[in-house]
Image (cartoon, rainbow, N blue to C red):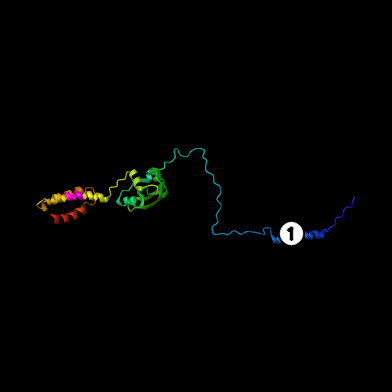
Amino acid sequence: MAPKAKKEVVPAKTEAKSKALKAKKAVLKGVHSQRKKKIRTSPTFRRPKTLRLRRQPKYPRKSAPRRNKLDHYAIIKFPLTTESAMKKIEDNNTLVFIVDVKANKHQIKHAVKKLYDIDVAKVNTLIRPDGEKKAYVRLAPDYDALDVANKVSLKFSSRIKWFELKLVKFIMIISALRRCQSCASDVNLFDLNVCDAFKGTTDAQIVQIHLFSVLRNIV
């Protein structure tokens, strides 16, 4: 059996010295030798957003849930049938509606989709001087605005056609008054006919003045 190698005995003084040197080195170096500094882009300090669970009440606080007052029937009031609206339908494939003032573009889009079952490409809105909100609803290329308007049963009697019908009435009035011998005696008759033809419109007085001057030259 080979004899055991004797361990070299290190003096206690030198051992303590080496330990002290190691500790000194560690203290000088520090624990966080590689510290990454956070780049701050805002002067405001904010707490992190923690998990917030939904409430699970033991009993309902209200007897009945609140009714949605701004449903698709309330959002879309009625379609516009003015001459400019008809031009939009024919030229730009766009329907024009009067909508609720509180409705936004997303709500208008969903309401049109739900009511008329059509895809909408874009919605533009404006507030009219009378306080109503007007919505220009451009349809997707797959849909034709004229077909949709017929489905919605819009009347395409534009203001020009309306004036044409009124002009036919005026021609009849003028031809009747031409046969009259004196213009002065039939002024009241002319006034009545003009007012009847333009009943319930704001254009009555304007047309009456213009046609009266024309009639003086004819008779």
Compare residues 80 and 126 and report the one nearer the observer: 80
Q: Amino acid at mark 1?
A: Ala
Q: Residues within 10 Å of mark 1 (few under 14, many from 20)?
A: few
Q: Is residue 181 left or right of residue 149?
A: left
Compare residues 48 and 116 and report the one nearer the observer: 116
Could you tell me if residue 69 is visible in this image?
Answer: no
What residue did someone put label 1 on? 23
Mark 1: secondary structure: helix
Q: Position of residue 92 (x, y in %)?
A: 36, 52
The range drawn in magenta is: 167-172
Residue 45 sits in which quadrant? bottom right
Q: Is residue 53 left or right of residue 178?
A: right
Q: Decide whether the magenta segment is chiefly helix, strand or loop.
A: helix
Q: Is residue 122 rendered magenta in the image?
A: no
Counting labels gives 1
Q: Position of residue 196 (x, y in %)?
A: 19, 47
Could you tell me if residue 173 is visible in this image?
Answer: yes
Compare residues 127 and 48 and report the one nearer the observer: 127
Q: Residue at x 75, y 60 (%)?
A: 22
Q: Among all residues in the image, which is located at the extreme front?
A: 142
Q: Position of residue 84 (x, y in %)?
A: 31, 52
Q: Is residue 168 rendered magenta in the image?
A: yes
173 w.r.t. 65: above or below: below
Compare residues 136 and 117 and report the one nearer the observer: 117
